[in-house]
């Protein structure tokens, strides 16, 4: 079922791209999106979106898992929402700091660095989650990485996009981010479902470690993409 839906989505995406290419007034200039730097930024956002939302859902679900599962903290939905506070606070801090850092570090390097931070959040969650404070710490690291990543992304795209197409390019990037978020949530659910034994209501604790490792892989791809963009010469990037 999932594979069929994915195939249908790919077909619809291809059909939409063909329609946009043939339109005299396209909603999105697909040709501009094909620019190596823009395509790289979208790939980074896709991988980053998968990782960011994967960890977000893993932590909140873990916090709400009843003690009877052998792990978790049995928090209610409302109380579990408090785990998001470090994410929001440090995400805000990173968003405020990024404009200052951009004067010294190129946006692609900031993307790569932020992806490493998010990967660090995954590593923290994979290694230490027996205490609620550790979940708060992992969520804070995630928030700081997401805040920096989101603040740096527009600069990567706008640097190579004509002013007449900036709205189109950014809108497409937001769509890619949303797709990545959705896929990240689905991947997390799939891994946890695969790690749930017959007759059990909750997945094994090791399934969360597996999901965290998958997230580290996604952020590694995102980091490499950001580094590849940073290595492009200014003349290539601005052409």
Image (cartoon, grey):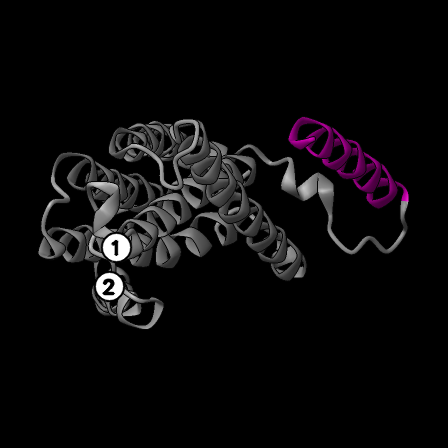
Residue located at (46% from left, 39% from top): 189
Q: Which badge, 2 or 1, comes first in the chain's sequence?
A: 1
186 relative position to 29: left or right: left
34 relative position to 208: left or right: right
Magenta part of the chain: 1-22
**Can residue 161 be seen in the rendering of this structure?**
yes
Q: Compared to 208, does 157 lie above or below?
A: below
Q: For residue 17: magenta? A: yes
Magenta region, main secondary structure: helix
The residue that disc 2 covers is 83
Residue located at (58% from left, 46% from top): 179
Q: Compared to 89, does 224 lie above or below?
A: above
Outermost residue on the bottom side: it is: 78
Residue 23, percent from left and from top: 89, 48
Q: Label for residue 63?
A: 1
**Can residue 238 be seen in the rendering of this structure?**
no
Image quarter of residue 74: bottom left
Residue 67, percent from left and from top: 21, 50
> Dot 1: what SS?
helix
Quarter of the image where the C terminus is located: top right
Image quarter of residue 77: bottom left
Image quarter of residue 202: top left
43 relative position to 129: left or right: right
């Amino acid at each position: 079922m999932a594979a069929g839906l994915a195939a249908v989505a790919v077909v619809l995406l291809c059909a939409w791209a063909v329609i946009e290419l043939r339109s005299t007034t396209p909603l999105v200039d697909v040709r501009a999106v094909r620019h190596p730097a823009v395509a790289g930024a979208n790939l980074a956002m896709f991988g980053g979106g998968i990782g960011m939302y994967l960890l977000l859902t893993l932590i909140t679900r873990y916090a709400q898992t009843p003690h009877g599962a052998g792990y978790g903290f049995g928090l209610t939905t409302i109380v579990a929402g408090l785990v998001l506070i470090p994410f929001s606070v440090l995400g805000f801090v990173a968003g405020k700091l990024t404009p200052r850092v951009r004067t010294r570090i190129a946006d692609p390097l900031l993307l790569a660095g932020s992806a490493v931070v998010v990967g660090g959040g995954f590593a923290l969650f994979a290694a230490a989650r027996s205490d609620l404070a550790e979940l708060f710490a992992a969520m804070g690291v995630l928030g700081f990485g997401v805040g920096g990543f989101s603040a740096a992304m527009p600069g990567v795209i706008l640097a190579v996009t004509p002013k007449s197409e900036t709205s189109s390019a950014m809108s497409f990037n937001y769509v890619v981010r949303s797709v990545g978020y959705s896929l990240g949530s689905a991947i997390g659910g799939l891994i946890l479902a695969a790690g749930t034994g017959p007759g059990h209501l909750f997945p094994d604790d090791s399934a969360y470690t597996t999901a965290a490792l998958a997230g580290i892989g996604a952020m590694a791809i995102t980091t490499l993409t950001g580094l590849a963009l940073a290595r492009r010469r200014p003349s290539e990037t601005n052409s």
